Image (tube, rainbow, N blue to C red):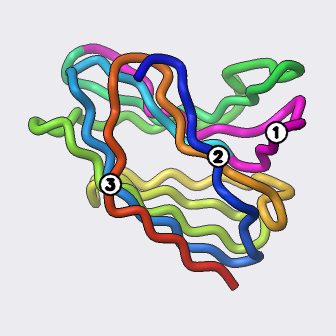
Amino acid sequence: TGNAWALFPRLGYQNRIEFTVKTAGKRDKFGISLVRGTDADVFYSLVVNDEGEETRKVNFEQQGTAGIGFLANGDSYVFQRPADNTYHIVITTDNSVCTMYINDVCCYTNRIYGIQRNCWSINSYSGSVEVTGLTVASK
């Protein structure tokens, strides 16, 4: 609830992360962060932003105490908010390539250096989110 996160162990070179997020309201904001540790000044996040009651947008952001926030040169992807506020997320990484799929309607790909051998997190930025069915497979 609110501004909170759950930090998970280091990832391998090739990963598949799968989970479901259920938001309590139509305007709740959540995401995942990669290359994140307890002492990371900068880490990278894929944020599912509220763009209105019916629209969501995946943004690439540099977060942490030394982060600059939204990266203007990174592409964003707009999609419709699911009617039941349930987001099935599948994230695959292969070295520095990260692809996030949401409900088979959104596919967002970016290059993020240092994913392997670093921690990651699932984040709530506003509202209330419930995460279920988390599985992680790494090579």
Q: Amino acid at mark 3?
A: Thr
- Dot 2 or dot 3: first in sequence order is 2
- Number of residue marks: 3
Residue 51 drawn at (x, y percent): 35, 18
First of labels 2, 1 by sequence position: 2
The residues bearing labels 2 and 3 have C-alpha atoms spaced at a distance of: 15 Å
What is the secondary structure assignment of the residue under circle 2? strand
Residue receiving disc 3:
132
Q: Are marks 2 and 1 in contact (CB under 8 Å)?
A: yes
Which residue does the numbered mark 1 point to in the structure image? 38
Q: CA distance from mark 1 to mark 3?
A: 23 Å
Please name the residue shown 72% across and 19% down the image.
69
Q: Is residue 56 above or below residue 126?
A: below
**Dot 2 corresponds to which residue?**
7
On the image, the x and y values in percent for residue 34 come to 70, 49
Give the CA separation, mark 2 to mark 1: 8 Å
Quadrant into which the C terminus falls: bottom right
Amino acid at dot 1: Thr
Q: What is the magenta range?
A: 34-52
Q: Nearer the viewer, residue 11 or 67?
A: 11
Q: Secondary structure at mark 1?
A: loop
Decide: is 126 above or below 103.
Answer: above
Q: Mark 2 Cα within 10 Å, few/some/many (few <14, many 20+)?
A: some
Amino acid type for the residue under numbered disc 2: Leu
Closest to the observer, 132 or 96: 132
Q: Which residue is at 38% across, 56% downward?
A: 89
